[in-house]
């Protein structure tokens, strides 16, 4: 084997995938290391090439090769990117804002690169969820990241049900147009008095960090137009005293006798007593079966 052949063989598989965090609003948050990495990358995978080209221009970087990589084409792009990495190239992956793979594309690429034995590293930096958490004033010693809730259906109901009893602080991303509805659903699942923080337009000119209860948040954000990226930080469920079945039964009976449907009665009692909807729903089912049995000839 000649010397040149040995060098060529050593280059095969010596590629590097770098996950690069970019500003979530304030371009001053682009780190020197991120600029250096993007300036040296052989290929930059990005959600929107136009947006990333603007960021590169701001950083004084030119001549880099860009490839679009977003939720709709990430799977199809994997073979091409892995081929670049296998040939020894350095590939950087960025999202439109923040840290790739966190509610953004890039996760499938990272997993595929790891499976192929490619070295993967990251340039840490801006992240809207973590920023909202650390300025929230809520507990940060234990927290979980929920990302975007499902928009509808059984998956959304299951996740809301779980949040009703989740003891850790929870970070949730939401689109501005769905914020009011999500806050209302959280209030129904977690109780109106649960503390919540709504962070909007972080690091930007009109940054807003609103703090209060879920009930107050429903009134605040249901009454005005909301713009910009939104992060909800939800306080964990406290250790509530046990609620006996008699209280649930009395509450359900009172609601139904007043004309509420079993579904609405369940939601009202769960919120009022601070217990999960599932627990109240099971009690409501038992009461309905009992009533139907009593009514049978």
Image: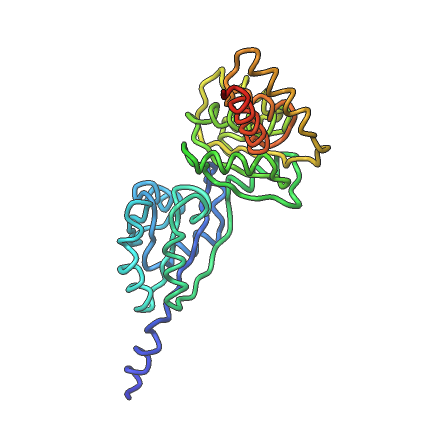
Q: Position of residue 271 (x, y in %)?
A: 60, 24
**Which image quadrant is residue 240 in?**
top right
- Residue closer to the observer: 108 or 23: 108
Residue with the most extreme front position: 297
Task: Answer left or right for 25 relative to 6.
Answer: right
Q: Is residue 221 visible?
A: no
Q: Is residue 175 above or below residue 83?
A: above
Task: Answer left or right for 92 relative to 244.
Answer: left
Q: Residue at x 42, y 58 (%)?
A: 18
- Residue closer to the observer: 89 or 131: 131
- Residue closer to the observer: 4 or 16: 16
Q: Residue at x 49, y 20 (%)?
A: 297
Q: Position of residue 20 (x, y in %)?
A: 44, 52
- Considering the image in quadrants, where does the N terminus appear? bottom left
Q: Position of residue 264 (x, y in %)?
A: 52, 20
**Which image quadrant is residue 270 in?**
top right
Q: Residue at x 66, y 34 (%)?
A: 137
Q: Is residue 14 above or below residue 209?
A: below
Task: Answer left or right for 61 relative to 245.
Answer: left
């Amino acid at each position: 084997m000649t010397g040149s052949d040995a060098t060529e063989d050593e280059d095969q598989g010596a590629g590097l995938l770098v996950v690069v965090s970019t500003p979530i609003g304030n371009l001053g948050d682009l780190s020197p290391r991120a600029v250096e990495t993007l300036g040296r990358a052989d290929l930059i995978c990005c959600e929107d090439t136009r947006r990333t080209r603007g960021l590169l221009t701001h950083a004084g970087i030119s001549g880099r090769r860009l490839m679009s990589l977003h939720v709709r084409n990430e799977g199809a792009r994997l073979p091409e990117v892995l081929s670049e990495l296998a040939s020894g190239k350095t590939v950087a992956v960025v999202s439109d804002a923040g840290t790739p793979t966190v509610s953004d594309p890039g996760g499938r690429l990272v997993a595929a690169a790891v499976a192929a034995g490619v070295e993967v590293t990251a340039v840490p930096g801006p992240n809207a969820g973590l920023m909202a958490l650390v300025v929230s004033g809520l507990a940060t010693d234990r927290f979980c990241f929920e990302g975007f809730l499902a928009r509808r259906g059984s998956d959304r109901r299951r996740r809301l049900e779980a949040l009703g009893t989740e003891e850790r602080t929870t970070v949730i991303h939401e689109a501005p147009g769905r914020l009011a509805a999500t806050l209302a659903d959280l209030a129904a699942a977690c109780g109106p008095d649960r503390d919540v923080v709504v962070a909007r337009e972080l690091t930007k000119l009109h940054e807003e960090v609103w703090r209060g209860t879920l009930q107050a948040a429903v009134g605040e954000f249901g009454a005005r137009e909301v713009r910009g990226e939104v992060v909800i930080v939800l306080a964990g469920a406290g250790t509530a005293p046990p609620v006996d079945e008699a209280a649930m039964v009395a509450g359900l009976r009172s609601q139904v006798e007043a004309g509420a449907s079993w579904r609405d009665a369940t939601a009202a009692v769960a919120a009022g007593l601070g217990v999960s909807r599932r627990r109240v729903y099971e009690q409501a089912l038992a009461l309905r079966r009992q009533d139907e049995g009593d009514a049978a000839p």
